[in-house]
Each structure stands twice: as C-alpha cells, then as structure tokens.
Image: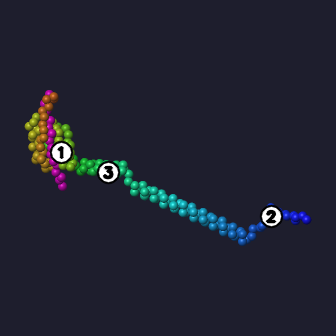
C-alpha cells in the first residue's frame, strides 16, 4: 500500500474584490489619511510650543554680562541726561557778557560739575585787576552764585606776562 498522493497548490486563484472589501479598503485608506494629517497638525503645534518655550527660557535666563552692559548703558544715559539738562545757553551767555564788561578776559575752559551745579572756569587776562573785575561782575549775575577766585598765576614764560586764573561758581536753576 502506498500513501495517497498529496497535491499542494502554491499558486491559488485570486479572489475577486467584493464590494464589501472595496468599502473596507476605502475606509482603511481614509482612516490612515486622517490619522496622518492629525499627526502632522499635532507635530506642528508641538514645534511651535517648543519654540515659544525656548524663547521664554532665554528671556528668563539672566546673563550677568548683559546685565552689566545694561547697567552701564543706564548710567551713561543718566550722565547724558544731566549733561543735556545743564542750562548751557544761559550760562555761556552770562560768562560772555561778563567777559565783555570786564574787557579782555579769555576763557580757556568751562567744566561743569552736574551733581553740585558748579562750574570750574579757567581763563587768562593781561593783569590781575581785570581778573578781579571779572569775578566782581559775575558776583552780580542772576544765574551764578558764589563766584570765587581759587587761584591765579602770572605766566613768566610768556613775554606779555598774562595772569592765568581758576575760579568756581554755582549756577542757579531759573524757572
């Protein structure tokens, strides 16, 4: 007796696509498409939120060097503001009028001290009486208070022997 013969068919006939199968295939493709689109939308939102978080983290992190630069800029802005608040037009007009009244006074420098509202004035004249007349004229000024001669020096290296002087005066804030 011999064993019955077994027939194995590795290539079977294809079944035809049924309408129910086609509907299920279409529903599957639609579900995958919707899931993919939803995934992309969520990924884009997540990227946007991460970008906002990075920006907020950078803002909240304090950089000591940046704080120093900011403090330096603030201090510089304060100094510039004080410089701009100095009533230069009035002060220089007063100094010029006094030098014309006292005759032949040459101002070499005018340095303000903003915190004390004080001017340090350096100048030259032909002789000491003219310097004293200049100081006396400034004492009658409406804009300057307490003009005082701090020092004077006869320049012997110059053939005309001019008197170099230094003085201070406080300025008043006028309305």
Residue furthest to the bottom in view is 20
Element at badge 1?
Answer: strand
Which x, y percent locates residue 17? 75, 68
Residue assigned mark 1:
119
Q: Quadrant of residue 134?
A: top left
Query: In whole angstroms, how far apart are the C-alphas of marks 3 and 1?
Result: 28 Å
Q: Earlier in the sequence, mark 3 or mark 1?
A: 3
Residue 161 part of the magenta segment: yes
Q: Earlier in the sequence, mark 2 or mark 1?
A: 2
Q: Are marks 2 and 1 in contact (CB under 8 Å)?
A: no
Which x, y percent locates residue 92? 19, 45
Is 81 displayed left or right of 130 in the figure? Answer: right
Q: Nearer the viewer, residue 64 or 42?
A: 64
3 vs 2, front mark: 2
Report the magenta residues as a range. Answer: 159-175
As drawn, the label of residue 12 is 2
Q: Residue at the spot x=16%, y=28% of the render?
A: 157
3 vs 1, front mark: 3
Is 67 displayed left or right of 164 in the figure? Answer: right
Which x, y percent locates residue 46? 51, 61
Q: Nearer the viewer, residue 168 or 34?
A: 34
Q: Is residue 113 above or below residue 15?
A: above
Query: In whole angstroms, how far apart are the C-alphas of marks 3 and 2?
Result: 85 Å
Is 151 displayed left or right of 20 in the figure? Answer: left
Residue assigned mark 3:
71
Determine crowd level at label 2: few under 14, some 14-19, many 20+ residues with C-alpha closer than 10 A.
Answer: few
Element at badge 2?
Answer: loop
Determine crowd level at label 3: few under 14, some 14-19, many 20+ residues with C-alpha closer than 10 A.
Answer: few
Q: Nearer the viewer, residue 46 or 11?
A: 11
Residue 87 part of the magenta segment: no
Q: Residue at the spot x=80%, y=64% of the render?
A: 12
Is residue 124 among what the camera can see?
yes
């Amino acid at each position: 007796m011999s064993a019955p013969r077994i027939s194995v068919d590795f290539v079977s006939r294809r079944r035809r696509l049924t309408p129910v199968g086609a509907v299920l295939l279409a529903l599957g493709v639609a579900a995958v498409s919707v899931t993919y689109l939803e995934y992309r939308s969520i990924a884009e939102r997540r990227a946007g939120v991460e970008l906002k978080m990075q920006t907020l983290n950078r803002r909240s992190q304090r950089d000591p060097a940046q704080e120093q630069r900011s403090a330096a800029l603030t201090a510089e802005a304060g100094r510039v503001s004080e410089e701009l608040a100095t009533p230069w037009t009035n002060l220089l007009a007063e100094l010029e009028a006094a030098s014309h009244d006292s005759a032949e006074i040459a101002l070499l420098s005018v340095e303000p001290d903003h915190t004390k509202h004080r001017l340090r004035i350096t100048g030259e004249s032909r002789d000491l009486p003219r310097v004293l007349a200049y100081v006396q004229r400034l004492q009658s000024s409406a804009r300057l208070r307490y003009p005082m001669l701090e020092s004077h020096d006869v320049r012997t290296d110059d053939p005309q022997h001019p008197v170099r002087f230094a003085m201070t005066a406080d300025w008043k804030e006028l309305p």
